[in-house]
Amino acid sequence: MIIKTDRLILEVLGTKHFPTACKYMTDTENAKLMVFLPCEDNKEVLNYLRKAEMQWENEKPEYLDAAMILDGIHIGAVSIEFVDNGKTGELGWIIDKNYWGNGYTYEAAKAFMEYCSGKYNLTHYIAHADSENHASIRIMEKLGMTFVSIYGGRKNRISDEIRKEVMYELFI
């Protein structure tokens, strides 16, 4: 799987991305508003990359992760988790903080949605974010998603604080 956008190449996220994935997946500032990140160590990153790579070989994957490549450099990832018996795609993303604010995540998410809509016939997308993650909220809105709800109970991995989470969705 290779997807080309104006500035990026999306490819299967896997073990070849280990060094650069470690950089953003273990960085506490980079992942402070994430539920499942930061990873505790590089071993956890490697285990995740192995599992992500194997998902691409399944006829009906549980999720798919694509690496964002900019000028030959791996800068982040975009993902789709298949929920609701595969009828809905839950979007997710992470990008190295050195590349924040350039529109790369939006570009990758849009292209990955188009790919998944075509390959897996997805017509419904959802996304969640910490209510304080204004950048992710802007991406969801730019993708055409609409606000569904805000609720409590979100616990980010590196915090004991119970936070609020927003949910957005899009039907296409």
Image (cartoon, rainbow, N blue to C red):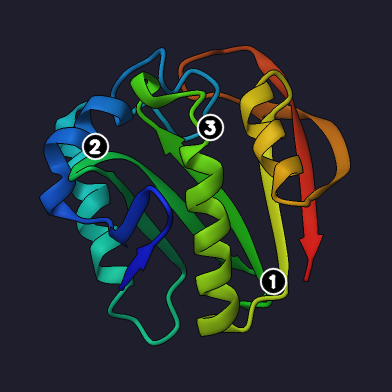
Considering the image in quadrants, where does the N terminus appear? bottom left
Report the amino acid beneath label 1.
Answer: Asp
Q: Seen in the image, is 152 located left or right of residue 132?
A: right
The crowding category of the residue bearing disc 3, from other C-alpha atoms within 10 Å (few below 14, some 14 to 19, many at least 20), is some
Taking the spot 44% from the left edge, 36% from the top edge, the residue there is 94
Residue 35 has which mark? Answer: 3
Q: Seen in the image, is 117 located left or right of residue 38?
A: right
Q: Which sits earlier in the primary sequence, circle 1 or circle 3?
A: 3
Residue hosting label 2: 21
Taking the spot 24% from the left edge, 41% from the top edge, the residue there is 74
Q: Secondary structure at mark 1?
A: loop
Q: Nearer the viewer, mark 2 or mark 1?
A: 2
Query: Above or below — where is 21 with respect to 48?
Result: above
Q: Secondary structure at mark 3?
A: loop
Tell me where residue 6 appears, x and y as whole percent: 43, 53
Query: Above or below — where is 94 with respect to 169?
Result: above
Q: Seen in the image, is 148 located left or right of residue 152?
A: right
Residue 111 has which mark? Answer: none
User: Is the C-beta separation of discs 1 and 3 under 8 Å?
Assistant: no
Report the amino acid beneath label 2.
Answer: Ala
Query: Above or below — where is 97 with respect to 2?
Result: above
How far apart marks 2 and 1 lie (CA) works out to 29 Å
Residue hosting label 1: 84
User: Is the C-beta separation of discs 2 and 3 under 8 Å?
Assistant: no
The crowding category of the residue bearing disc 1, from other C-alpha atoms within 10 Å (few below 14, some 14 to 19, many at least 20), is few
Considering the image in quadrants, where does the C terminus appear? bottom right
